[in-house]
Image (cartoon, rainbow, N blue to C red):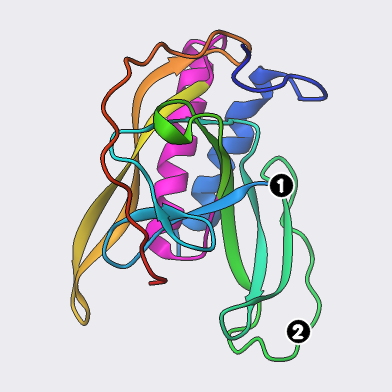
Amino acid sequence: MSTFALANLPSVTTLSTALRSLSKEVAPVGFVLVKMDKAGYWSYGSDATEVEDDSKWAINPFSFVHGYIAWGVAEILGEKMVSVSEPLPETDAPPAGAALGWQVQIGLSLKCISGEDKGMEARFSTTSIGGKRAVQALAVLIAEQVDKEPSKPVPIVLLERDHYQHKSYGKTFVPLFKVVEWVSMDGEEPVVEPEAAPARRRRGAA
């Protein structure tokens, strides 16, 4: 079984430059949506289903995107996203009601490969500094891996959390993509031993 479909994808060897471009852009400052809330818990979907502990996720190295998003009151008013291999899209006036205007956003796509959510595909997008740095760090790791071993550009990660002490808000959690192994785009998915599934919880919106 292929981890990701290879049709119409550019050469793996073109990844390095595009992924490293994220460092310059974010350092200064059909899928479900996966996110990490303010308490440091990962969840997905409109009902905030908590991500299963120790579930493994494959990151699609060709899915990194950047662009802009405009938020209203708990709703997206506009979004312009392109591949990181392309320049940031041009923007016009932000939609009416977008108090913060256009915000820079980056994101990626991932696929669960273990546990009860196995096979589910998701998207992670972020405008926060901590989230951008997590995506940036992962992008650089993939670029380095492509340089060393281009036949295995797909990182298998655990969705974890890190934190720092904010001078105003105290302990602040940020996403962490912990790479546990590397696989090929068309190789077999890693064999994961089945474990007893813990009770799942629903988390309210952060």
Q: Amino acid at mark 2?
A: Pro
Q: Could you say which is closer to the camera, residue 144 or residue 68?
A: 68
Q: Could you say which is closer to the camera, residue 72 or residue 105?
A: 72
Query: Are the residues at dot 1 and dot 2 in contact (C-beta closer than 8 Å)?
Result: no
Q: Could you say which is closer to the camera, residue 139 or residue 17?
A: 139
| Label number found at residue 97 | none
Is 33 in the magenta? no
Q: Main secondary structure of the magenta part?
A: helix
Badge 2: residue crowd in 10 Å (few <14, some 14–19, many ≥20): some
Above or below 24: residue 145: above
Is 146 in the magenta? yes
The CA span between labels 1 and 2 is 24 Å
Name the residue tied to disc 2: 95
Q: Amino acid at mark 1?
A: Gly
Magenta stretch in the rendered image: 124-153
Name the residue tied to disc 1: 30
Measured from the top left, where is residue 196 in percent x and y? 26, 28
Above or below 204: residue 31: above
Q: Quadrant of residue 170?
A: bottom left
